[in-house]
Image: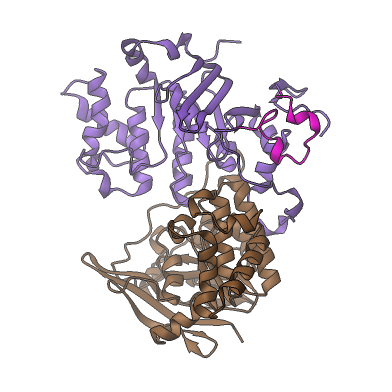
Chain colours: A purple, B brown
Amino acid sequence: MTAPLLDLRDLAVQYPSAHGMVRAVDGVNLAVAHGESVGLVGESGCGKSTLARSIVRLAPITRGQINFDGKDIATLSRAALRAIRPSIQMIFQDPYASLNPRMTILDALAEPMRVHGHATRGDVTTLVAALMERVGLASRWMRKYPHEFSGGQRQRIAIARALALRPRMIIADEPVSALDVSVQAQILNLISELCREEQLTLLLISHDLGVVKHLSHRIAVMYLGKIVELGDAEQVYNAPRHPYTRALINAIPIPDPTRKRDRAGSLLRGDPPSPLNPPRGCPFHPRCPYMQERCKTTVPPLEPMSDGRVVACIRKEEI
Amino acid sequence: MPLLDVKNLRAHFHTRAGVVRAVDGISFTVDPGEMLGIVGESGSGKSVANLSLLGLIPMPPGKIESGSARFGDVDLLSCSNSERRAIRGKRISMIFQDPMTALNPYHRVGDQIMEPLRVHERSTKREAHARALEMLQRAGIQDAERRMRAYPHQFSGGMRQRVMIAMALITRPELLIADEPTTALDVTVQAQILELMKRMQAELGMAVILVTHDLGVIAESCDRVHVMYAGRIVESARTTDLFTAPKHPYTRALMASIPATQKKGATLHTIAGSPPDLTQAIIGCPFAPRCEHAAPKCAAQPVELLGIAPGHATACLRVQLGEIA
């Protein structure tokens, strides 16, 4: 097996706050192979976005390694980091916030190329035009401003900008959450097509398991800063093993009334707890329907099961 | 007799860019005790339609151009403000997507829940307090006595939505309008809130209009559904019929674009183009420019929402004529 492109080892991000240390990301191990697409799911506050941002050093790293193509990004100097930046690009949720309203599309897409010396003044227009056509935008629009575009088109612009430096890896943080369903489908198709054709490695963060299942080879489920289940996308989606994954999947409304279920018995109680004061033992135990006494004291390790996936639950084999 | 009978409602906004026909002639009824879903994408008019009923759109620029909305013996669209105030928050309540903007951050939650009783029923403080406490408990708030004295910011998102529900239901309304009540919530909390709404609906026997963009939420909760597009209702059916035999090409396209229902990795169905500019008059079907089944006549003549099977109506000319299945 070849070395993974991205290999996170015991990655932790902690923020000091007035009420103590917030453990946003709490010791994550995750390897993403070349050309692989891994989905990261979890509810608000589980640390999925912080994890994504820490990989491109937009969040302060407290501990651990971020090995990208054999180099540990976590300890790189600013100059060395700059050399790596073109290889990992991010797409954010809100294309209204991530594009500068005063820059034309041409400027927005040309800027990274100029900064990193990927284009000269002469050929930048040609490159931008090609890039726009690549993501399904007419290149004659390049002198327009972001407000002249719809949400879906803006997300295409954000994708074009992420592609401008020919990255090897894309980190997409909730790329379709702000979009309507029909537009969402267009953007998902585009991301999937680009990943296939450009052999991109994708880390896709979403709260929507349906979206993640559709695009990912493997799914990682996060809860309170930790990965609780990681495995083949179909396996995790169709036969989840961690009690939290089960509850999460069970809570998704299914657009099929003939499969209407009575969920009253399987609903999770309470809200996701705060990473400020995580429960002792298994972080999920206060909400877990299978909780036993030992779950309150033992932190379950993320261990492999017979089918290859890893699950952090001490009762994973019995339930 | 329906609880609410809306006929030919038109709500337009007169802006500098032109007249935006946000809601352009919709008619529907709500029966007592049913849960009616209204589904549509951004800008389809689903929220404006419901806000209009309660006189909650800003006027100007908004204007109710035509229509009636019979609720008992009152027409909500033409009644006086005092008549409307007597109904709003008493016989018809509304909850919104973001409970933080609907709750006053400076007042204790208990006082806010008691307010509708104090205003509409002139209840004593003691009586209002007792009923608020009971309603909070029924809405699933633990330690309700203590939580009555807390402020909104001390609650989580899901708990705030429970508070909103308690506040909306304390006057035992006949109709609850819920506008994207779970959109801001995590999926596990969304499931709890939908379950709570269904339970309260059964306990109080009220009707609910559930406005959402999420077909999954509709499938799990509603008895009947209206699909809105460009300010109009394009399809209306019982929930099971809508999902097993969607008729309008827009409804079908919408369903085919949901990733969860499609085969993994398959190219998702997309709808070409974008919704029409509502400042321009649309003569025919508003979906025609994006419709894969459109014929020249679709854009040329007005199309109405017509019944094609018992309880199932569609505003697609070609389906009505039997030209497409």
Q: Is residue A141 left or right of residue B182?
A: left
Above or below, A145 against A36 in this view is below
In magenta, the rendered stretch is A278-300
On the image, the x and y values in percent for residue A170 come to 44, 27
Q: Quadrant of the N terminus of chain A?
A: top right
Q: Main secondary structure of the magenta part?
A: loop
- Which residue reaches farthest bottom? B73
- On the image, the x and y values in percent for residue A201 come to 49, 23
Q: Nearer the viewer, residue B51 or A62?
A: A62
Instruction: Tell me: residue A269, above or below residue A260.
Output: above
- Image quadrant where one finds the C terminus of chain A: top right
**Looking at the image, can residue B321 be seen?**
no
Residue B262 location in percent, x, y?
60, 45
The correct choice, above or below, for A97 with respect to B107 in the image is above
Residue at the extreme left: A122
Q: Residue at the spot x=63%, y=47% of the render?
A: B188
User: Going 24% across and 21% down the picture, which residue do you hit?
Assistant: A115
Q: Nearer the viewer, residue A17 or A282?
A: A17
Answer above or below: position of B123 versus A12. Answer: below
Look at the image and say whether residue A177 sits in the magenta stretch: no
- The image quarter containing residue B203 is bottom right
- Can residue B138 be seen here? The reply is yes
The x and y percentages for residue B46 are 46, 66
